[in-house]
Image (cartoon, coloured by chain):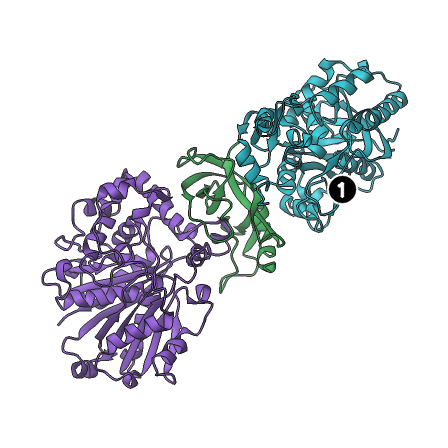
Amino acid sequence: MMKPERPVGIAGYGVYIPRFRIAAREIARIWDGAGGVPVDSKSVPGPDEDTITMSIEAARSALARARLAAGRLSAVWVGSESHPYSVKPSGTLVAEALGATPWVSAADWEFACKAGSEALTAAMGMIGSGMAEYVLAIGADTAQGRPGDALEYTAAAGAAAFLVGPAADAVAVIEGTTSYVTDTPDFFRRADTAYPVHGHRFTGEPAYFSTSRGAAERLLNDLGAKPSDFTYAVFHQPNARFPQTVAKQLGFTPQQIAPGLLSPKIGNAYSAAALLGLCAVLDVAKPGDTIFMATYGSGAGSDAYALRVTDALVERRERAPLTTAYLARETFVDYAVYAKWRGKLVMG
Amino acid sequence: MDLAKHWRIRHARYRLEGQRHRTTGEVRFPPAPLRPGEAHDSWEPYVLSGRGRVYSFSIVRQPPEGYDEQAPYLIALVRLEEGPLVTAQLTDCDLDQVTIDMPVEMVTRKLRALGPTGLIVYGYKFRPVV
Amino acid sequence: MRNVYIVGTGATPVGEHWDRSAASLAVEALAAALGDIPASRVGALYVASALNGSLEVQSQVGPMVATAAGISGIEAVSIEAGTASGGVALRQACLAVASGIVDLVAVVGVEKTTDVLDARRERALALAGDAEWEAIHGVTTTALWAMLMRRYMHNYGYGIEDFAPFPVNAHANGVANPNAMYRFAITADKVRSAPMVAEPLGLLDCSTAADGAAALLIASEGLARDVSAAPVCVAASAVATDTLALHSRHDPLWLSAVAHSTATALRAARMTHRDIQVLDVTDPHGITAALVLEAGGFAERGAAVALARDGAITPKGALPLATGGGCKARGDAVGANGIYQVVELVAQLRGQAGAAQVAGASVALAQCIGGIGATAATHILTME
């Protein structure tokens, strides 16, 4: 288990989910979906949205919850597999929009769906070492799936931002983290290609399940804790079934994961997926509650965290829109509009 | 390649940073250059709240070059709560949803891309309050 | 300062001149204005063009037209003030003649818009607004007028249909103008059922940008008597400006450049509004004409649309407007509009306006505004 010498926590958090949705059945209407659909619907970014714009909004909410001036940030880090530029950081633009420039570190992180939690773990190190007081760790994605591919049903968009700071100023203290990584090619996208490829059933047990369990079991063991010690649990959610299955394998109950399970309605928000789940849990948690989270990124790795909610959460969470506000404004589009906005209309 | 003209006003575009007069307290947006006779420190940077109401609006159906793919889109004059009026697109908003005086809030979005290989220009838009 | 006279007018039809260049249109208009006067007598040439730089990718339009007219060597300069270019160029010509330095000046307004038919055209027209704070948001000049129209309707309780008399009047008058692009009448019903361009502005309440050139010869008093049987006096000339961006204005529904330049011109001519018997203003949309009439003092605030509804703007009304068809039916020659207006009003003052003739007209007002009113140029013309 990794744990900073100086206690660290989440001082503020913010979410962003685009307004638009497409129903999985609508995708199935176009492509043969006779085998059932992995989610009910997924979020779709509007034509003027990308990882940068979504990161900005989530980050603004995180700062608003902590009432922290952006000038006090030591770093703005954006984890994503869909940075708008291949070369030119998202982090600088997000930092500029927040008003955090120029005396700030900014960088982009990449690790498939756990790029955001990479930034979170690194932020713990910055704060825990005393190098920094506050760091923004953001996970955001506008994920793409090849038309007709299984991934198209779930590849979604969203952002979650965590303002990481000293535990004394936290809505939730991070009690420890583990990271579990192997070279497992379950899903990847080569440079300069539009859509990723995935390993079908190889993405399951040898990748998502064993990796998530690896990080989770190590953290539970090092904490001397068992699943029933936690009020809530959140897992990476590439579809509706995987997080429920891995929770069951580890011994978490459906009740523990229900508040943080967003994928049935918004699909897989990639780098934001598990982090959005954690935000949704913080929206409803009470002081003293404990939260277990394990992220997952293909390639493959998982970061597990144990958090404990403080008294500060109750007041701070009301200072910015709750996850439910974003979930509630769902506007469904058909496949034609979705294809137009996502750049899928290409003459052969 | 248009770079500097967008770069130098990034604070106004990304976060609605205008100016406040140090003595009168007047807030203005967009920021303006110093006028003849004004002391160099007359105005200080000031970030507006982003909250306002729709003064008027229209739908652009014959777009200028660079906005073809967005059309039809909503354009509005927004009266910001600090006083200034600002021209911007409305986003996350149905074409038939807008009314005069509708409360809106600022979001930072993509305004346009300067071609498939060029700069992406980001800036303020407004949407119905979440 | 010397008195200044218009001693010659000329214009090409407004339309889609596929086989004509800007220079050839300009020379045709100039030749018509010159008539029997040798081009060699022209002391200076002012060319008004709003879009030549952006659409034709050609600057130095002054020497371009002078060269085509065979008078290269003279002082020739292009003047750009958006859709007010023509009026501003006319003012420069008046100043030059009034100063005593030049006796005969040619003013040519020319616009060639149909060489570019894609979205670059809307972009070029939007250049008249503020590039940094308006155009970057995808706003068009039409959309800015549309927003003013919606707010006007909200403030004063009008419906879209109340604006129809403006294009209906323009089309009725355009029938009599041989240079008009649309020489047919339209009904209020047709205006109402037209598709939307920028809500609440429909297609038949929007002018069409087209090609055309118009020219005037401006002379000193002494020369005017020699070369013209019916010189028209420029009794006043005034240019005023407003903020470039619409949103910078304290009251967006008030066109202060129009107010200032109209008041200045009336004062200079020692006239009141009642002296003006016929007028032509920038009127690509009904709302534009309405706001211009109100800021100009020809109608109370909120009342111009009611005046139009009650028939005041027809040739037989108290406030005859767009007797040559206006921007809507004549066709919108953008930077040349300000010259077309004067060509048409000179015909009115000479009693040559045919079916659109305002009986006994001897005092006329021409006014053109740039973009959403950042520039306003007003001229009062009299027939002695």
Seen in the image, is A190 located left or right of residue C329? right
Which corner quadrant of the image does residue C282 belong to? bottom left
The quadrant of the picture occupied by the C terminus of chain A is: top right
- Image position of B124 (left or right of C60): right
Determine the residue positioned at 75% across, 24% down: A235
x and y percentages locating residue C35 in the rendered image: 22, 78
User: Image quarter for residue A199?
Assistant: top right
Vertical order, B70 against C35 (above or below): above
Q: Position of residue C102 (x, y in %)?
A: 30, 83
Depicted C89 relative to depicted B107: above or below: below
- Quadrant in which the N terminus of chain A is drawn: top right
Where in the figure is residue C75, as x and y percent of width and height? 37, 81
Q: Which colour represents chain B?
A: green
Does the image show residue A151? yes
Residue furthest out toward the left: C360
In the figure, the shade used to draw chain A is cyan
- Check the residue under mark 1 and report the chain it is in: A
Colour-to-chain, purple: C
In the visual, does A237 lie left or right of C209?
right
Q: Nearer the viewer, residue B62 or B130?
A: B62
Three-letter residue code for mark 1: Trp
In this figure, which residue is indicated by the disc labeled 1?
A109
Q: Tell me if mark 1 has few (under 14), some (14-19) or many (20+) residues whose alpha carbon lies within 10 angstroms of its own.
A: many
Q: Is residue A65 visible?
A: no
Is A348 or C315 nearer to us in this picture?
A348
Relative image position of residue B57 (x, y in whole percent): 41, 42
Q: Nearer the viewer, residue B3 or C64?
A: C64
| Along the viewing direction, whichever of A281 and C138 lies nearer the viewer | C138
